Image: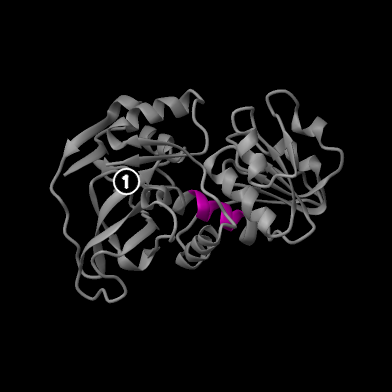
Amino acid sequence: MKAIRIHRYGDASVLRHDDIPRPAPGPGEVLIDVAATSFNPSDIGLREGLLRSVFPIDLPYTLGGDVAGTVAEVGDGVHTLAAGDPVIGRLDGGGAAAEYVVAPADILVAAPAGVPLAHAAAIPIAGLTAWQAVFEHADVTSGQRVLVNGAGGGVGGFAVQLAKHAGAHVVATAGPRSAETVRRFGADRIVDYTATPVAEALDEPVDVVLNIAAVSADTLVPLVRPGGVVVSITFPVEVPAGSPVSATHFVVRNDTGHLAALVKLVETGAVHLDISASRPLADLAAVHRDAEAARTRGKIILVP
């Protein structure tokens, strides 16, 4: 089978389209016929070796943390899934940038009905990150004012929709390419960060800042009311000593309960997917280059 692997760390040129043996599922595992994986900005740091302390990997390494596909075979002891079942999941060890991938059965959930299976590859990592930011770390509730800093990306689109689903008033930063999509996802106000600093655009403090942009959130702390919180998925936030504002930085974790709940919201139309492009898996290096040049938005899925 074909797979996109890295044999060494480096720029996008290290991504290789290799022929490798098709894997077989072991006990507790299933073999997935991959419909699609998706690109995540963290893939760049993984490829460059910048995330070795957080996500240690063995080389050669097959990329692809998101998977959507159909169960092709089940291993011993798997009774919750059967061949032909459409599934999605977050693969802690990657591997979905391939025609087939083996995954533990217990990290997979049923793919959402009514959504093209390949499109569902956009959900796991970005969706889980947004879910845990909104509901676990920020504990967003109805009536709060929430600033989503970096709403135009994959995580940002989910974060805006989930905060609105929780009943919040959402202010979102987005550039001109993403503004209309973010507005369609329910943002009550959009700040064009390319034209106006967010600190100048806000007319009153917010209860929550969700920092999804790859920038320091330290300058956003003064925008939060006393008792509020800054949640960052990119860089840790430094809060001055004695500040009445709390801050947290986290790395997403696998949680099938969260993922299944998100799938339900997608099925009911409460949350929509922002698929900006569908590309052949062989284009993955070009997608990396586009992302590094800030030419991407939303979620890009990659089809074997």
What residue span does the magenta drawing correspond to? 126-133
Q: How crowded is the residue under tag 1: few (<14 C-alpha within 10 Å), some, or many (20+)?
A: some
Quarter of the image with the N terminus in it: top left
* Front residue (pair 226, 141): 141
Please check the rendered image and state whether residue 178 is part of the magenta-colored stretch, yes or no.
no
At horizontal 52% and vertical 65% (from top left) the residue drawn is 261
| Count of all numbered marks drawn on residues in the image | 1
Q: Is residue 143 left or right of residue 46?
A: right
Q: Quadrant of residue 256?
A: bottom left
Task: Relative to 167, say whether 27 is above or below.
Answer: below
- Confirm whether residue 10 shows in the render: no
Q: Which residue is mark 1?
A: 57
Return the residue found at the far left.
Answer: 21
Please check the rendered image and state whether residue 127 is part of the magenta-colored stretch, yes or no.
yes
Q: Is residue 297 left or right of residue 208?
A: left
Q: Is residue 37 left or right of residue 297?
A: left
Q: Position of residue 268 (x, y in %)?
A: 55, 62
At horizontal 36% and vertical 54% (from top left) the residue drawn is 91
- Confirm whether residue 284 shows in the render: yes
Q: Position of residue 100 (x, y in %)?
A: 23, 51
Task: Relative to 185, say whether 162 is above or below.
Answer: below
* Front residue (pair 266, 29): 266
* Front residue (pair 51, 108): 108
Return the residue found at the far right.
Answer: 203
Return the residue found at the far front.
Answer: 114
Q: Give the overall secondary structure of the magenta segment.
A: helix
| Amino acid type of the residue tagged 1 in the rendering | Ile
Q: Quadrant of residue 215?
A: top right
At horizontal 22% and vertical 34% (from top left) the residue drawn is 17
Q: Position of residue 213 (x, y in %)?
A: 60, 37
